[in-house]
Structure formats: C-alpha cells, structure tokens
Image (tube, helix red, strand yellow):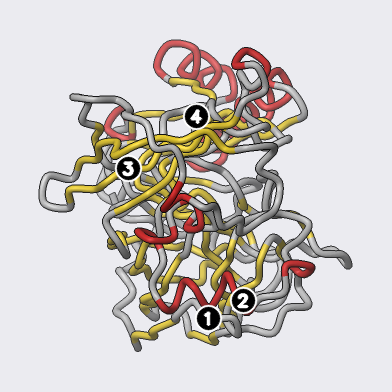
C-alpha cells in the first residue's frame, strides 16, 4: 500500500540520492537530551540513506563484553556533567535539507544489526515493581545468537546502591555472577527505543519521556521493515537515534529492555503532503498510533483521539464509523510505564481497508 498525497495521487518510492555513514563519536553524539541548538552531525537530502551507529548507555554493565574502542571513547571522553537531563546516547542530529516546522519526516528503517553479541537488562529503581523487590536493583547480561535471532541469559548480578549515573561502568568482571533464566530462549527483536526530532524549545529536553517529537517511545515494533513518521518542530528536523534494544516486551516493566548497541540503516524522506499530530508507525501489516500522558487514562485518550484522526482524516471514515471500528478491531496496548510520561499504542490492521486503485493511506 503506497503512501499517497492529499489528492489521492500515488507517490513513487524515492530512490536514494546518496548513502551516508554516521559513526557514534564524542563529536557526533549528544547524551541525554534533544535540543534545536545542537550542531548537526550530518546534513542529508530527502531520500538519502544513512548507516548510523546507535550505542547503548548500558554498555558499562558488562564492559568486558559490550565495550569496543569506539564505545569506550564515549564513556571516557564525554564529560559526565553534560550527560543530562536524560540518560540516552543519541547519535546525530541529522539535518534534512528543505525540512520546515510542520513537515513530516518519513523514516524507513531497513536494517538493525547488533554491534556486539551481548546486551544488558537492568531491573532498575525506576522499574514498575522496584518496591516489590525490596528496592534492589539487578543486572542480567544476555548473549545474542545472530543466526537464530534469539537471546539467552549468561549471568546476573545485584547492583549495589542505586543505578543513577548515566554511563555507569560496573565492576562486572569481578562481580558476584549468578545463574539466570537457565534453559530459556528469548526471541530477538532489534529496535530503537528512542528516536525523534528536536523539540522547538529553548532548553534541552530530556530523552527519558516520549512526546510529540518522538523520543523514548519504547515500542519494539520500531525495527527493520517499519516506517515512522515524525512531525518537524524546527528547521531541518534535526533527527537523532539512540537507546538501541535487541528485545523488549510491551510495558518495559523492569525499567529497561535488553539494551545493546545497533548499527542501523534507514532512509529519510521529507513529506510536505500530509500532516499527523503524533509519532505514527507503519508496519507491513498495521498502522500504530501512540499516545502519551501523566497517567494511562490520559495516554489512552490521546492515542484514541489520534487514531480517530487517522481513520477519519486519512481513511475517509465518518467519525461515527471510525469510533465503531476502533472498538471492534483496534488493539490498544501499554507501550511503557517506566519513563515518567506513560505510553499507550493502538494498532489497526491495514488489510481491512478496500484497495480501490491507489489506496488512500495517508494525507
């Protein structure tokens, strides 16, 4: 189903004009924040391909396994005082020529390849059940099987005190390692937990809560084969990626996923032919709308209203018909409950809609 413009005319797929390689270095990342004041790490044209490195801020949970020279530079050369107000290492920003506030960036994610075959899950002090575990934090280190696309736990250890400093490097090589999840194999679903455009604000915005700019959405479906739409708030969009995961469940209940660095291949296409108020995800089967709020009721309401907008404005259903369809065929889920601002997503099967020549997908 090809995306189309407002007049229902098919938009041909944009052939890549160039391919860019964006490494994560102390000069090309910003740690813990989005801001329109950051100098672009890369400038691209609409349709360009970008091969970019996304590095996990949890690599220090097992530095003997998750560090290489490039990752170690980020942890040792970037001033800890500048890692604020959030926690995620963001690669970018990427300036898209011609992008203006109100335009949409269509980001097609093609590949997400683990940088190394290890990842970390932290049962954190911000996890949903922290109090239930006696305010204890625990790290579980996972090994990835790239051929089978699975992961299994190698070992776990209790973290002393509170895990508060972004980029913490633990003493894991001599820590008290304990067996974990013996005999359990977990499907790997590499994806970006955090990606988005710069908000139009004067002060740095934390990477921890998601918002209309994107950010820490933590939807495991934002992986290879998916397309995300982000609404530009500033000139050039200033798009960044980070918080890479190799697997996560809806809710991210312990506070983290399997955090692991990824090499990502994606294409950015500038869209001036349609508008959508919140980060919109398109997978081969579904449209997925995201809602955020201080509690789940607010997040649910926001997701509902934006799905209503999608079905009414972009699929031509009456509001009454869209409301009925949402109740009988749309699936709501809790994206995450651990990032301050809570997240709800709602997905609808694209295959339900009739194909009459060119499908009116968006715009």
- Sequence-wise, the earlier of marks 2 and 1 is 1
Distance in Å between CA atoms under marks 1 and 4: 48 Å
Q: Which mark is residue 317?
A: 4
Spot occupied by residue 222 in the image (x, y as percentages of width and height): 41, 48
- Sequence-wise, the earlier of marks 3 and 2 is 2
Along the horizontal axis of the image, is 252 left or right of 265? right
Q: Residues within 10 Å of mark 2 (few under 14, many from 20)?
A: many
Q: Residues within 10 Å of mark 1 (few under 14, many from 20)?
A: some
Instruction: Determine the residue positioned at 35% across, 88% down.
Output: 18
Look at discs 1 and 3 and give the one toward the viewer.
3
Spot occupied by residue 47 in the image (x, y as percentages of width and height): 40, 77
Q: Nearer the viewer, residue 138 or 83?
A: 138
Using the rendered image of the protein, determine whether residue 315 is visible from the camera's viewpoint: no
Spot occupied by residue 216 in the image (x, y as percentages of width and height): 60, 47
Q: Which mark is residue 118?
A: none
Instruction: Determine the residue positioned at 43% across, 53% down.
Output: 62
Look at discs 2 and 1 and give the one toward the viewer.
1
Distance in Å between CA atoms under marks 1 and 3: 25 Å
Using the rendered image of the protein, determine whether residue 357 is visible from the camera's viewpoint: yes
Q: Which residue is mark 3?
A: 142
Pointer 4 with pointer 3, Cβ within 8 A: no
As drawn, which residue projects farthest toward the right? 202
Q: Which mark is residue 99?
A: 2
Q: Nearer the viewer, residue 183 or 322?
A: 183
Q: Nearer the viewer, residue 338 or 123?
A: 123
Q: Which mark is residue 25?
A: 1
Along the horizontal axis of the image, is 225 left or right of 124? left
Distance in Å between CA atoms under marks 2 and 4: 30 Å
């Amino acid at each position: 189903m090809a995306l189309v413009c407002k007049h229902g005319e098919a938009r041909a797929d944009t052939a890549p004009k160039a391919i860019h390689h964006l490494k994560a270095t102390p000069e090309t990342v910003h740690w813990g924040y989005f801001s329109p004041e950051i100098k672009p790490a890369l400038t691209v044209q609409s349709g360009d391909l970008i091969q970019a490195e996304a590095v996990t801020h949890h690599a220090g949970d097992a530095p003997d396994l998750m560090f290489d020279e490039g990752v170690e530079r980020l942890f040792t050369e970037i001033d800890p005082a500048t890692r604020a107000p959030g926690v995620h290492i963001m690669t970018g920003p990427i300036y898209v020529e011609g992008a203006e506030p109100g335009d949409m960036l269509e980001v097609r994610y093609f590949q997400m390849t683990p940088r190394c075959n290890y990842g970390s899950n932290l049962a954190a002090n911000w996890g949903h059940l922290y109090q239930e575990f006696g305010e204890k934090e625990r790290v579980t280190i996972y090994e990835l099987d790239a051929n089978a696309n699975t992961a299994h736990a190698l070992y776990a250890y209790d973290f002393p005190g509170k895990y508060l400093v972004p980029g913490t490097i633990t003493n894991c090589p001599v820590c008290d390692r304990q067996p974990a999840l013996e005999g359990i194999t977990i499907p790997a679903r590499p994806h970006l937990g955090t990606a988005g455009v710069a908000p139009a604000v004067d002060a740095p915005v934390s990477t921890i809560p998601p918002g209309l700019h994107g950010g820490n959405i933590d939807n495991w479906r934002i992986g290879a084969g998916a397309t995300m739409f982000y609404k530009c708030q500033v000139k050039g969009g200033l798009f960044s990626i980070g918080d890479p995961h190799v697997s996560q469940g809806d809710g991210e209940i312990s506070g983290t996923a399997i955090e692991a660095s990824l090499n990502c291949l994606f294409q950015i296409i500038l869209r001036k032919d349609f508008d959508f108020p919140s980060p919109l995800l398109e997978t081969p089967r579904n449209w997925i709308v995201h809602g955020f709020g201080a509690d789940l009721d607010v997040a649910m309401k926001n997701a509902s209203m934006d799905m209503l907008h999608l079905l009414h404005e972009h699929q031509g259903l009456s509001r009454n018909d869209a409301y009925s369809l949402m109740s009988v065929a749309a699936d709501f889920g809790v994206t995450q409950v651990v990032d301050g601002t809570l997240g709800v997503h709602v997905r609808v099967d694209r295959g339900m809609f009739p194909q009459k020549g060119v499908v009116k997908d968006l715009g």
